[in-house]
Image (cartoon, rainbow, N blue to C red):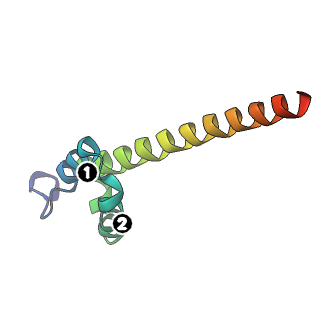
Amino acid sequence: MRGQSSPEVDVLTHMKCALRAGHLVLCLLWIVDYLSQLDSQAIQLSYYQQCVSLLAFVYWSVVVVVAVVVQVVVVLRVVSIIG
């Protein structure tokens, strides 16, 4: 029954729009807060699993970018030390 009703707040659409507009950082806090308040049954619904999957994708995208930047900084540092 719950899986067939529409969510009160269309979190997924808000996340996708914010991601496209480059404003996701402005929405992340309330989205994570909203999702953290869902009960254990609601978070299992396909809709909210899609929301969590998108958050995970964003998180891992940032982790990969940071890892690459760190590697570049290390290489540049080694090159500057070696001369």
Mark 2, residue position? 29
- Quarter of the figure with residue 57: top left
Identity of the residue drawn at 37% across and 68% down: 36
Q: Name the foreground residue: 74 vs 27.
A: 74
Q: Position of residue 60 (x, y in %)?
A: 50, 42
Task: Please state which amino acid type lies under the numbered disc 1.
Answer: Met
Identity of the residue drawn at 62% across and 38% down: 69
> Disc 2 on helix, strand or loop?
helix
First-in-chain label (2 vs 1): 1
Task: Judge left or right: residue 52 versus residue 15.
Answer: right
Dot 2: few (<14), some (14–19), or many (≥20) neighbours within 10 Å? few
Task: Please state which amino acid type lies under the numbered disc 2.
Answer: Leu
Residue 45 to residue 27: above or below: above
Mark 1, residue position? 15
Split into 4 quadrants, where in the image is the C terminus? top right
Q: Name the foreground residue: 13 vs 65.
A: 65
